[in-house]
Image (cartoon, rainbow, N blue to C red):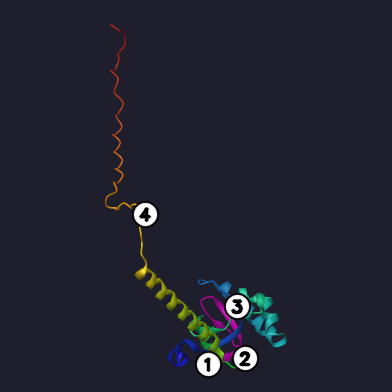
């Protein structure tokens, strides 16, 4: 019953697992920087014809994924650069894309795996459901016990507690008097009489 009523929590969104090679390009790139990035892209494309994607990514990529051969965590729609997502979600596994221009620069991606939206089976989530129900029962019992204790407890005060309204407030410090200007000395002229 719980699974059916809460199945929205057990839905996996469509996702892709990609590897990428990034050639960075500044937002306001000069013609020289654009030509340099284009040359790097052509070099990468040529090497991809001869070498595994992971080796080329490690050698040429200009982002952190280069340390993992371009490997990225799985991506769901709306979680990465839209232009890259659009291409990735339209590819087949092991396909390598043409260069994709984004605000970061150029991306060349390889689709590792793609999975469609799906509902996890009860078997996949039954332990998670059991844990959720156990937590719910624990907190419900804890709340009931606390409420019962508050309702039925006899509280006896052995020390008088002052009402905060009756406690004197500390007076505000008196304002410091303004500093006096130094007194002017009478001017003396020439010889004393």
The residues bearing labels 2 and 3 have C-alpha atoms spaced at a distance of 17 Å
Q: Is residue 93 above or below residue 149?
A: below
Estimate how packed mark 1 is, as few (under 14), some (14 to 19) or many (20 or more) residues with alpha carbons within 10 Å: some
Residue 173's x, y, as percent? 31, 40
In magenta, the rendered stretch is: 93-116
Q: Which residue is mark 2?
A: 95
The residue nearer to you, when weighing 152 against 193, is 152
Residue 62 visible in the picture: no
- Residue at 57 percent across and 75 percent down: it is 34
Mark 2 crowdedness (10 Å alpha carbons): few <14, some 14-19, many ≥20: few
Q: Residue at x 48, y 84 (%)?
A: 133
Q: Earlier in the sequence, mark 2 or mark 3?
A: 3
Q: Quadrant of residue 95?
A: bottom right
Between the C-alphas of marks 4 and 3, the distance is: 72 Å
Pick whichever of labels 4 and 2 is earlier in the sequence: 2
Precedes in sequence: disc 4 or disc 1: 1
Distance from disc 4 to disc 1, alpha carbons, whole Å, reads 56 Å
Q: Residue at x 46, y 81 (%)?
A: 137
Residue position for label 1:
122
Outermost residue, top side = 193
- Label 4 sits on residue: 158
């Amino acid at each position: 019953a719980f699974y059916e009523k809460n199945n929205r929590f057990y839905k996996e969104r469509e996702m892709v697992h990609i590897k990428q090679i990034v050639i960075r390009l500044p937002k306001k790139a000069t013609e020289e920087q654009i030509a340099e990035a284009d040359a790097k892209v052509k070099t990468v494309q040529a090497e991809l014809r001869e070498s595994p994607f992971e080796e080329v990514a490690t050698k040429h990529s200009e982002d952190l994924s280069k340390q993992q051969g371009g490997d990225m965590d799985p991506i769901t729609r709306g979680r990465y650069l839209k232009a890259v997502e659009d291409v990735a979600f339209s590819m087949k596994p092991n396909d390598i894309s043409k260069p994709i221009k984004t605000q970061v620069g150029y991306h060349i991606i390889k689709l590792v795996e793609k999975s469609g939206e799906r509902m996890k089976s009860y078997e996949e989530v039954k332990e998670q459901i059991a844990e959720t129900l156990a937590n719910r029962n624990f907190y419900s019992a804890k709340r009931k016990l606390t409420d019962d204790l508050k309702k039925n407890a006899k509280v006896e005060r052995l020390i008088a507690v002052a009402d905060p309204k009756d406690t004197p407030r500390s007076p505000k410090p008196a304002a410091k008097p303004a500093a006096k200007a130094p007194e002017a000395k009478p001017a003396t002229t020439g010889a004393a009489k």
